[in-house]
Image (cartoon, rainbow, N blue to C red):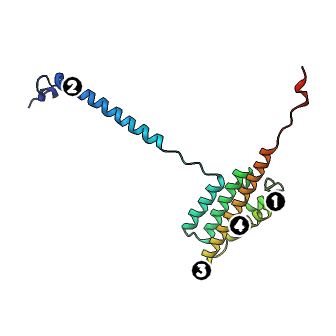
Amino acid sequence: METQAPDAYLHAGFWDTWGIWLALAAILLAVAAAVILLIRKKGRTAPAPLTPAQSAVRDITMLRETHPSLRQAAVDFSLILRKFLVGETKDPALYETQQEFNRRADALTALSTELQGPTRDLLDRMAVLKYEPDTPENDSMVNELADRTVQLINDIDAASRTTQEETDLIVKKPSARTNQR
């Protein structure tokens, strides 16, 4: 069987009659699609990025919903808190063991003294809970640990925002040399 060219199936003069209309329809369809896409993109606004504190609280909430064991919760909450501390205070807590962290004299110095104690206590508590046996009351302990971690993160975030606002209020005095020639 012989193969025929695709044009053999069309009537003679098809492209002369309908070609311009098909090209115009394709162009019109492309323009309409472009307009629709542009309108949709303009209508959407990108959500505001989460602050480090909001991101940490979201992670804790999501983890709590998975009902982890006490051991796993202590490990994960500690990791979330340490990541937050690294981002918020530039403290290298994420890269140290709890013993190294406790021995370092400059640990948490970026935090106010009121927050250093509770932060150390919570991290110490989590370090101990990593080795606790599983018991039926673990769910309540996981929830209590999550609540304490969220509260501490919110307190650190509020303190850092207050410090930043105070820093922003400092007005620089003009230099005495401005009138020199």
Distance (Cα) linking label 2 and label 4: 76 Å
Q: Nearer the viewer, residue 63 or 165?
A: 165
Q: Are marks 4 and 3 in contact (CB under 8 Å)?
A: no
Give the answer, above or below, for where 170 lies relative to 99. above
Distance (Cα) linking label 4 and label 3: 20 Å
Residue under label 2: 19
Give the answer, above or below, for where 6 lies relative to 62. above
- Quick one: which residue is furthest to the top in this view? 181
- Quick one: which residue is furthest to the bottom in this view? 136
Q: Which one is earlier in the sequence, the residue at label 1 or at label 4?
A: 1
Instruction: Assign a secondary structure to mark 1.
Output: helix
Nearer the viewer's eye, disc 4 or disc 3? 3
Mark 4 is on which residue type?
Answer: Ala
Residue at the (79%, 45%) spot, across then down: 169
- Left or right of residue 16, residue 35 in this image: right
Distance (Cα) linking label 3 and label 1: 34 Å
Nearer the viewer's eye, disc 2 or disc 1? 2
Nearer the viewer's eye, disc 2 or disc 3? 2
- Left or right of residue 119, residue 16 in this image: left
Q: For the residue carrying disc 2, how many other residues have a C-alpha within 10 Å: few (<14), some (14-19), or many (20+)?
A: few
Instruction: Assign a secondary structure to mark 2.
Output: helix
Q: Examine the rendering and report whether any part of residue 57 can be seen.
A: yes
Residue under label 4: 127
Nearer the viewer's eye, disc 3 or disc 1? 3
Residue under label 3: 136
Nearer the viewer's eye, disc 2 or disc 4? 2
> Where residue 31 appears, x then y in whole percent?
35, 32
Q: Which one is earlier in the sequence, the residue at label 4 or at label 3?
A: 4
